Amino acid sequence: MHDKSNSKGRMSGQYSVMIVSSSEQFNTVVKKTLPSGRFSSIEVRKSASAARRELLARSFDLIIINAPLTDGLGVDFVMDISEKKNTQVLFAVPVEVFKEISSRLVDYGVITIRKPVKEMDLELSVRLLCAVQDSLRKANREVVKLEDKLQEQRLVSRAKLILIQRGMSETEAHEYIIREAMDRGLTKKAVAEEVIDE
């Protein structure tokens, strides 16, 4: 299947995916449907227990589960990873239990699709999960930026206090940090750390 990622220009980055399924036919359909060039790794596990072991070693952006698994339907496994892992989950279930299971899992943020799986439903669901994962990545980057900025402000305030204790006015201390940063090509945080460490 050709790369759909540019159709709206929304999907970005690489994703890791784990397929949890004992059906080779399902695995083949999923691999064929995944947008080409978008997945850095695709792992396949045949049971919830094997998938849990893999999740202890590493994390995945997307987990696609084909119920039933060799060790049960997989609903508890899905709920568990949805609560504990920062991953997006797609759960394919038999049509007879689709309504009940999708109703249970919707509050966990799990996309449930009925089997037999239509390629179009699978493709759209994967694209949706990738878009959600992109939004989470962006939000995480913003949080890191805000935390860095807050840390810088704390250090600058502390450095100013030290400079004031050494005899500068608050304005002089502020201007000193800015001037040193500009003259030496440093960040205000780096200058503040120098003042604190002196």
Image: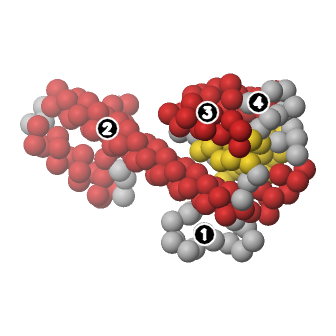
Tell me the crowding category of disc 4: few under 14, some 14 to 19, or many 20 or more residues within 10 angstroms, Cα based.
Answer: some
**Which quadrant does the C terminus fall into?**
top left
Tell me if 80 is positioned left or right of 11 in this view: right
Residue type (three-letter) at the residue carrying disc 4: Leu
Residue 88, position as x, y percentages in the image? 60, 43
Q: Which type of secondary structure does the marked residue at label 1 adopt? A: loop
- Mark 4 in CB contact with mark 3 (< 8 angstroms): no
Tell me if 144 is positioned left or right of 28 in this view: left
Q: Which residue is disc 1 drawn over? A: 5
Q: Earlier in the sequence, mark 4 or mark 3?
A: 4
Q: Earlier in the sequence, mark 4 or mark 2?
A: 4
Snapshot quadrant of residue 53: top right
Residue type (three-letter) at the residue carrying disc 2: Leu
- Mark 1 in CB contact with mark 4 (< 8 angstroms): no
Residue type (three-letter) at the residue carrying disc 1: Ser
Q: Which residue is disc 4 drawn over? A: 73
Q: Nearer the viewer, residue 122 or 47?
A: 122
Residue 165, position as x, y percentages in the image? 17, 26
Snapshot quadrant of residue 30: bottom right
